[in-house]
Amino acid sequence: MKRRNLMALVLAGVMASSVMGCASQSGAKNPSETQKEAAKEGASNESVSKDNESGAADSAAVPAGSWKPDHDITIRVPNAAGGTMDTITRILGQGIQQSTGTTVMINNLTGASGAIAANDLLAKDADPCELMTSGIALFTLAPLFNQDIKVSLDDFAIVSGMVSEDFVLCVNPEKSGIHNWEELKAYGEKERILFGSNTPGGTTHMLGTALFGEAGLNAEAVTSDGTNKDMLALTSGDVVCAIGNASACQQFIEEGTAVPIAVFSADAYEGFEGFTVPSVVDLGYDIQFKSCNFLMAKKGADQTALDQIHDMIQAYTETEECKKLAESAKYVPDIADGETVRAMIEDSAKMCQEIYEKYYH
């Protein structure tokens, strides 16, 4: 695929949504006309751009290492072409391609929360040229709420982190008069809390169920198919609070229609200008969960080669070319190593299992 196709997909990702793909920004078309056009250009099995017209100088600094693939590299993406995860994969695939001199093919295999793409990868021989991008839900929430999804983290080797993001609880003081967690808790001790979230089996539904359950508050989810809709419900006063990934909440916070009052992490969040958002752990509730997307291979693939792929990706994110593409796509790379990502998945899976057994089972 020519470089213009890659850039079209990057621009599509900008117009379509924020990085984590959990929800689109307020006012964005779904899908936009630009995204539709980009998706046509970036259909399954397209290769990432091979010419280095604008990035040749940068790519020369990316270490190739001793591993040299002898055939094309295929990266399965369990999301549609033109979407956020597809765009991020193509950006990082550009770095792998420049480092190895080998064509990187993107194969969009959607469905079953990523299980279709995962099973396609498992059907291949263990090979560092056969890869897949995955979300953390495939190994945490999806198997709990869909018994037909039978995937095991033990069957895969994690190559590299790609992106991670916090989830935030927001209120709308103008509609509810609530400004912080203590005020929300006091409200919940007298009235039922309606909170915006995705449907049962989704991350924000699970986090809200666990938080209000642990706090002993009467709460009910008002569900939708996207954080953008949940935040709009908060803006209109249809819900008292809403939970969403930080990037999806940001526009509403900047507009003043939402105020972040808690983050589902161990530490306070300072990514919103003018706010230091307390962690739910500091509030007394040990509920930690981040969205995370990562690159993985089938277990048994040459670990030396996988380590070099991680190093290639990390080095590419430091180039001016990648920084420009990432900025256009509103993408903040988080290139953690495979062991770090695996530990995060395992910890999150354990927490999800505990919440599922306590509140859903």
Image (cartoon, grey):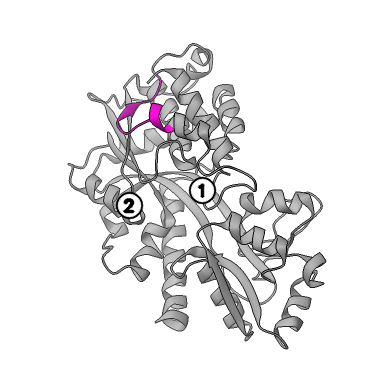
Q: Is residue 64 visible?
A: no
The stretch in magenta equals 39-49
- Quick one: label 1 or label 2, which is nearer the N terminus? 1
Q: Position of residue 240 (x, y in %)?
A: 70, 72
Residue underneath mark 1: 21
Q: Is residue 121 left or right of residue 96?
A: left
Query: Which of the two residues, 180 or 284, is positioned nearer the viewer here?
Result: 180
Q: Position of residue 71 (x, y in %)?
A: 23, 25
- Residue located 41% across and 30% down the image: 93
Measure the C-alpha gap from mark 1 to mark 2: 15 Å
Q: Position of residue 320 (x, y in %)?
A: 59, 23
* Element under disc 1: loop
* Element under disc 2: loop
Q: Quadrant of residue 283?
A: bottom right
Q: Amino acid at mark 1?
A: Gly
Query: Which of the two residues, 221 or 259, is positioned nearer the viewer here?
Result: 221
Is residue 223 depicted above or below 81 in this figure? Answer: below
Q: Quadrant of residue 353?
A: bottom left
- Residue located 26% across and 65% down the image: 148
Residue underneath mark 2: 111
